[in-house]
Amino acid sequence: MTSGRIIVVVIVLSTIIFGLGLWYTNTRAYYAPVEDLVLTVQTEDGTLVPLDVSNAEAIDAATSPLRFRACFTLDDPAPLVDAMPYEDPTPLIPPAWFDCFDATALGEALEAGTAQAYLGAFDTARGVDLVVATFPDGRGYAWTQLNGTLE
């Protein structure tokens, strides 16, 4: 094998290894399940009201405040009566393996009005809000998204 071929093989293998490492760190490495999920909605006066949820699945990562996603069943919709509606909810796409959270379908439901989004908590991290969305049948989803205060 000539030195040119060796260099090409090293470059190709390095690129493949780097690509696999990049894929792993973006989709698997930092996500962890959230064990004791506590979700809230915020009222007009800033009070955080806890939600009674079951069948919860949630993931989060310490590397970014935007990696939180949750799916749950809302057992008692009463706290939503005083909750602040969320302007411009944009569900963020989760890793493919977290299949209970379909950001595209949720976004379409929010646009169509078949789901309603509420402010879960303002500025959970600098410039990031917790958003909670629910369907009339009790299905619920939560995620974090930028709130525009960093501009």
Image (cartoon, helix red, strand yellow):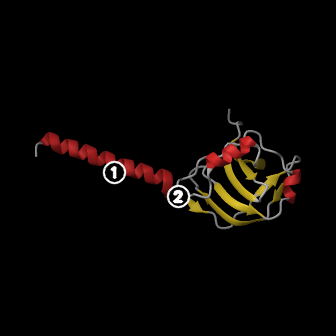
Q: Residue at x 64, y 60 (%)?
A: 58
Which of discs 1 and 2 lies nearer the camera? The answer is 2
Using the image, determine if residue 35 lies above or below residue 85. below
Disc 1 from disc 2: Cα separation? 22 Å
Q: Position of residue 19 (x, y in %)?
A: 38, 47
Q: Which residue is mark 2?
A: 97
Q: Does residue 116 appear in this view? A: yes
Q: Quadrant of the C terminus?
A: top right
Q: Position of residue 24 (x, y in %)?
A: 44, 54
Q: Position of residue 137 (x, y in %)?
A: 77, 58
Amino acid type of the residue that numbered disc 1 sits on in the rendered structure: Ile
Using the image, determine if residue 76 lies above or below residue 13. below
Tag 2's secondary structure? Answer: loop
Tag 1's secondary structure? Answer: helix
User: Upstream in the sequence, badge 1 or badge 2?
Assistant: 1
Q: Does residue 145 appear in this view? A: no
Q: Which label number is shown at residue 86?
A: none
- Label 1 CA crowd tier, 10 Å (few <14, some 14–19, many 20+): few
Determine the image quadrant of residue 75.
Answer: bottom right
Q: Give whichever of 112, 77 is nearer the camera.
A: 112
Q: Residue at x 71, y 40 (%)?
A: 147
Q: Which residue is mark 1?
A: 17
Q: Residue at x 62, y 46 (%)?
A: 104
